[in-house]
Image (cartoon, rainbow, N blue to C red):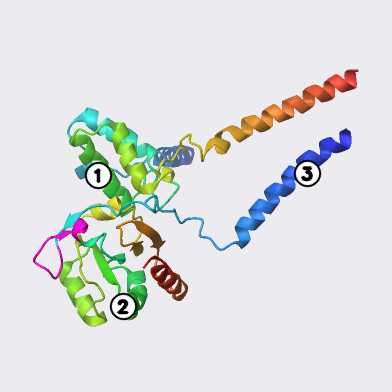
Amino acid sequence: MKNRLIIIPLIFFLLIILTFFYLLIIERNPSEIPSNLINKEAPYFKAESLFKDKEFISSEHFGNEVILVNFFATWCKPCLDEHEFIKGFSNKKKIKIIGINYKDNPKKTIKWLKKLGNPYSNIPLDKNGRIAIEWGVYGIPETYLINSKGFIKYRHVGPITKKIYKKINLLIDEIK
Amino acid sequence: MIKNKIIIIVFSLFFTCFFSYYSYSVEPDEILNNKEQETRARNISKNIRCLVCQNQSIDESNAPLAKDLRILIRDKIKSGKKDEEIYNFLRDRYGDFIFLKPTLSQNTFLLWFLPFIFLAIGLIIIFFNNKKSKN
């Protein structure tokens, strides 16, 4: 009986150690918060559009085809780093990309896009950050993949890397 | 004279440290004129996690997102929204993690009750062990 009593806490202790060890070795970012909007309809919003006279109304765009939504700003260095990959989605995958320009100066954005290339089919302006809050954004760049029914299927926080680029490409093929 | 100076320095250091804990990041232009509404906004803000710093409430955080959320909460209060509606709005977008104090739900059931379950198991083991040794 006494031996059994010693074994029980030992098993618990080993289980805790194994759990922590597992969490240490798997690839994860503990500070990354999972999106609460996965498999939910993309939030509705209206906003001024950068290159177009017509106001951007989200419901007119989402729900017809697979769309990538990218929150970006010219003052954000990681946005510059991922720009080549965003262009890759536009050129190679021929996918529609909505670039939500987060708290930025429109003149600077136009200059930035002229210099680096514009992969976005429409650029709604999020002047006060309210659209980002509607989408549960907490740090740009953030990228969302919307399926043809207008539902959010994937969210990536941070710049798109080679690995994430491949992952999103596979997801696009999967949900197309 | 030197003793007095040391006392003053120690006291000012103590008060600086003590009150800095209670420092808040609400800026003057954010504060609502209606005192009751402002108190509600402060109470809600104290329960909402700053998702950038992750270990501070938006009431204490200087992060731009925390400021945006504070303004949003005040706008919602001004437009007549109830506290519950504001909490639900934030939960819908950021999940339960937005609350500094975890809510009681199916997912957090173990987090809340596991210590009590372990305590009960321990007490049962002790109880039966005592009974056996007495016999």
- The kind of residue tagged 3 is Leu
Q: Position of residue B94 (x, y in %)?
A: 37, 48
Q: Are marks 2 and 1 on the same chain?
A: no
In whole angstroms, how far apart are the C-alphas of marks 2 and 1?
34 Å
- The kind of residue tagged 2 is Lys
Residue A128, compared with residue B111, is above or below; it is below
Q: Position of residue B90 (x, y in %)?
A: 33, 43
Letter of the chain that mark 1 sits on in the rendering:
B
Q: Position of residue A151 (x, y in %)?
A: 33, 56
Q: Is residue A22 left or right of residue A74?
A: right
Residue annotated with mark 2:
A87
Instruction: Tell which of A77 and A156 is nearer to you.
Output: A156
| In front: label 3 or label 2 | 2
Residue at image point 40% right, 71% down:
A173
Residue B72 - label: 1
Q: Is residue A63 left or right of residue B46?
A: left
SS at circle 3:
helix
Circle nearer the N terminus (3, 2): 3
| In front: label 2 or label 1 | 2
SS at circle 2:
helix
Q: Is residue A174 left or right of residue A150?
A: right
Q: Is residue B9 left or right of residue A143?
A: right
Q: Is residue A127 visible?
A: no
- The kind of residue tagged 1 is Leu
Q: Quadrant of the N terminus of chain B?
A: top left
Q: Name the outermost residue toward the right.
A: B135
Residue A47, compared with residue A105, is above or below; it is above
Residue A157, compared with residue B2, is above or below; it is below
Which region of the structure is painted magenta?
A: A49-60
Residue annotated with mark 3:
A10
